[in-house]
Every structure is written in C-alpha cells, then in structure tokens.
C-alpha cells in the first residue's frame, strides 16, 4: 500500500514530507501527530494507513485544523463517524473483510468443486467511504467494526 501511495503522490506532483510509523499504539500516534504539526505548519493532507487514527484525529480537532487538512483514513468503525460528520476526515478507505472472505471462499469452492485455478493474489476492490455515503453503505443504525 505504501509503495502504491508513493507512486500516486509522485504521479500527481504531491510531496510526501515524512512517513511516520505510530506502531499502532494510540499514545504514540498522538505524540507523533503533535510533533508533525509543530514541525510542518503547512500540511495539506494526511493519509493514515492504520485504523489507529482516533488520537491523530483528536489532535487535529484540538489544534482546530479540521477542514484545513484533507485527511484520508483506513477502515470503518463507529468511532470514526463523528470525524466524518465534522468534516475532519475527508474519506476513509474500507477493505471490507466480509467481502474479502466471501470472495476467497468462493474461489476455494470453485477450485475444489470444479478444479478452477486460483491466482496467488486475489484482489478485492476497496470502498471509499465519505460522509455522503456512510448511511447508504452502513445504514444509520448498523454497527460496524469495533476496534
């Protein structure tokens, strides 16, 4: 995912100023976010490639940077929705594990039942979730992944 993101950034003339690894630890994410915002005062966008995004989003909100920075997160979970509603998060990329598992089981069944060959890599299309399509995709009362 990182290589693809770097290639796309280069293609569209975007400069990646730093890649920060929060090690999926919430406190580390908060600490690194504060450090990055003090080091770079003109950040245009952030891509958070981990579901460990809440502390970073809280920091963005505390610093009143919501709406000034385009933020793309990963995964879908109930705690993320308020940040979409407040337009702190622009969108989130959701890989939908249910459909990933279903597709793999279908491939396995077709291999066992019909001898269909299966490639070593099976792609599934991610879903781009925004405030405008959250309810359409996940329903206003549906509970999504819990962290």
Image (cartoon, helix red, strand yellow):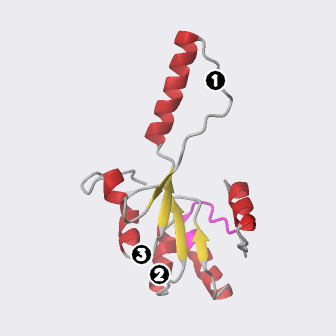
Instruction: Measuring from the top left, give residue 113's x and y in whole percent.
Output: 52, 11
Measure the alpha-carbon separation of dots 2 and 1: 44 Å
* Residue at x-position 45% and y-position 81%: 61
Query: Which is nearer the N-term, disc 2 or disc 1?
Result: 2
* Residue at x-position 59% and y-position 72%: 46
- Asked if 16 appears above or below 4 in the picture, the reply is below
Rendered image: mark on residue 87: 3
Q: Quadrant of residue 122?
A: top right
Q: How many marks?
A: 3
- Asked if 120 appears above or below 97 in the picture, the reply is above
Q: Secondary structure at mark 3?
A: loop
Instruction: Measuring from the top left, give residue 11's x and y in whole percent.
Output: 74, 64
Query: Which is nearer the N-term, disc 1 or disc 3?
Result: 3
* Residue hosting label 2: 67
Measure the alpha-carbon separation of dots 3 and 2: 6 Å
Query: Which is nearer the N-term, disc 3 or disc 2?
Result: 2
Q: Quadrant of residue 4?
A: bottom right
Instruction: Measuring from the top left, give residue 25's x and y in whole percent.
Output: 56, 63
Q: Is residue 32 visible?
A: yes
* Residue at x-position 54% and y-position 79%: 69
Q: Nearer the viewer, residue 127 or 64?
A: 127
110 sits to left or right of 21: left
The magenta region covers 19-29
Rendered image: mark on residue 131: none
* Residue hosting label 1: 118
Q: Secondary structure at mark 2?
A: loop
The stretch drawn in magenta includes residue 22 = yes
């Amino acid at each position: 995912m990182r290589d693809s993101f770097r290639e796309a950034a280069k293609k569209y003339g975007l400069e990646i100023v730093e890649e920060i690894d929060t090690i999926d630890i919430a406190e580390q994410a908060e600490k690194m976010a504060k450090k990055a915002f003090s080091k770079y005062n003109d950040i245009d966008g952030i891509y958070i490639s981990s579901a460990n995004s809440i502390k970073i989003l809280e920091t963005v909100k505390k610093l009143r940077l919501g709406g000034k920075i385009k933020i793309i997160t990963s995964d879908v979970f109930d705690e993320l929705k308020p940040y979409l509603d407040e337009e702190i998060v622009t969108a989130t990329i959701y890989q939908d594990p249910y459909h990933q598992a279903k597709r793999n089981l279908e491939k396995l069944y077709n291999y066992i039942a019909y001898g269909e060959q299966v490639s070593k890599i099976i792609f599934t299309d991610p879903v781009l979730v925004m405030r405008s399509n959250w309810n359409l995709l996940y329903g206003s009362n549906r509970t999504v992944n819990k962290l």
